[in-house]
Amino acid sequence: MELLAGAVELKVGVRPDSSDVAEFLASLGKHAITDPSNPGAFERTNRPAESNFQVPAGETIRGGQLVLRGKAYSYSSAKDAMVIVLRELAKDDATFLERCSRHPDAQGRKRRYIARTPEEIYPDREDLRDYREPLPGGWFVATNLNNVLKKTIIRLAADVAGLRFGTDLRVEF
């Protein structure tokens, strides 16, 4: 898990949470980590990997609570947390989503993560265009993203809004 987290950090510039790495590994379906205290111990299985996966003590994969400008919001998934942050910040500033969409971290090689149309979000993948959430002012945010990208979008939203991530905006997933 450490090797993979380190490789992601070198590539993207952000170190993923261990729960994100574990979730990714579990989703591969070939191996499952059966003993979180010994990441080198793998077991072959024909069942889905999630059935063998154990979340490390003190960590969660799904819901939680985020705090934005001192106000707490409950969320059920990383997607919900990202959407809550974008919608709440867009309420106060009509230009917020436009500025977010122009941020360098708001796009991949081919697509935008925040855009006016589903076609801009998934230009080459018509089959994925339903994986989006509406935002105020006719904007959309992509939801077919890994948790590292969702957290990147939350961080860029904080940056665009002039907030300090970890202080003015806190979220854990």
Image: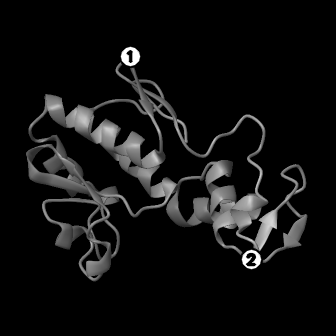
The residue sitting at 54% across, 36% down in the picture is: 172
| Quarter holding residue 9 | bottom right
Give residue 31's position: percent from left, percent from top.
78, 72
Answer left or right for 20 relative to 149. right
Look at the numbered disc 2 and give the secondary structure of its residue. loop
Give residue 74's position: percent from left, percent from top.
44, 29
- Which residue reaches farthest bottom? 124
Look at the numbered disc 1 and give the secondary structure of its residue. loop
* Residue at mark 2 to residue at mark 1: CA–CA distance: 43 Å
The residue sitting at 34% across, 69% down in the picture is: 108
Disc 1 residue crowd, few under 14, some 14–19, many 20+, Cα 10 Å: few
Q: Is residue 90 above or below residue 141?
A: above
Coloring scheme used: one colour
Q: Is residue 155 visible?
A: no
Q: Is residue 124 above or below residue 24?
A: below
Q: Point out which mark residue 78 bears.
A: none
Amino acid type of the residue tagged 1 in the rendering: Gly
Placement of the C terminus among the 4 image quadrants = top right
Answer left or right for 38 relative to 8. right
Give residue 35's position: percent from left, percent from top.
88, 54
Give residue 7's position: percent from left, percent from top.
65, 66
Considering only order in the chain, which callout, 1 or 2, is on the residue closer to the N terminus? 2
Q: Nearer the viewer, residue 161 or 134?
A: 134
Q: Is residue 87 above or below residue 168?
A: below
Query: Which residue bears the numbered disc 2?
Result: 30
Answer left or right for 145 relative to 53. left
Disc 2 residue crowd, few under 14, some 14–19, many 20+, Cα 10 Å: some
Q: Nearer the viewer, residue 108 or 40?
A: 40
Q: Point out which mark residue 70 bears.
A: 1
Which mark is in front, 2 or 1? 2
Answer left or right for 148 relative to 144. right
